[in-house]
Amino acid sequence: MDSYLQPKSRDVQSSVGGQVKTKYFSNLVLKKVKKLTRGNQVLLLLFAMLGLLFLLNVALGSVNIPLSQILESLSGQSEQNVWNDIIWQFRFPKAITCVVAGASLATGGLLM
């Protein structure tokens, strides 16, 4: 185990139920969270936009499917068989193909 994850004896605040809470570990986590650089923020924003646009791609079409129905279909709790067929047989494969094709084009452009 890395030495920076080892709690130091002077940092131990309490031991509750077998879990040791340390100032050291919480400070380490806070430092990692605060270290979001400009590049990481942009990357996080791009992945959030990819997820949003993926859901919009699945939701919008000749038959508009509500976002709540898409989430129910993902979890397997949907009762709308027609919408489940549309989502799983047509829209998800199309959306996944679009993401993979875009990533392939970006990788090809990077290599050129």
Image (cartoon, rainbow, N blue to C red):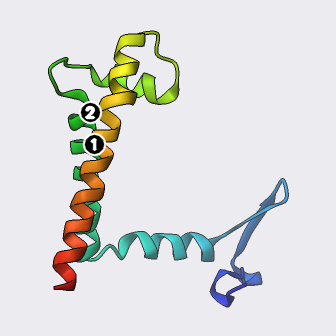
Residue 3 image-quadrant placement? bottom right
Residue shown at 66%/80% (left/top)?
A: 5
Residue 57, placed above or below residue 102 = above
Please give the label number shown on residue 58: 2
Kindly give the residue lying farthest to the bottom in the view shown. Answer: 3
Whether residues under marks 2 and 1 lie with C-beta atoms below 8 angstroms apart, the answer is yes
Q: Can residue 38 be seen in this view?
A: no
If you read the primary sequence from the N terminus, does the residue marked by circle 2 or circle 1 appear first? 2
Counting from the top left corner in percent of width and height, residue 68 is at 34, 22
Q: Circle 1: is it few (<14), some (14-19), or many (20+) Cα within 10 Å?
A: some
- Nearest to the observer: residue 29 or residue 41: 41
Q: Is residue 19 visible?
A: yes
84 sits to left or right of 15? left
Mark 1 = which residue?
Answer: 95
Question: Dividing the image into 4 quarters, which one contains the N terminus?
Answer: bottom right
- Total labels: the figure holds 2
Amino acid found under the numbered disc labelled 1 = Ala
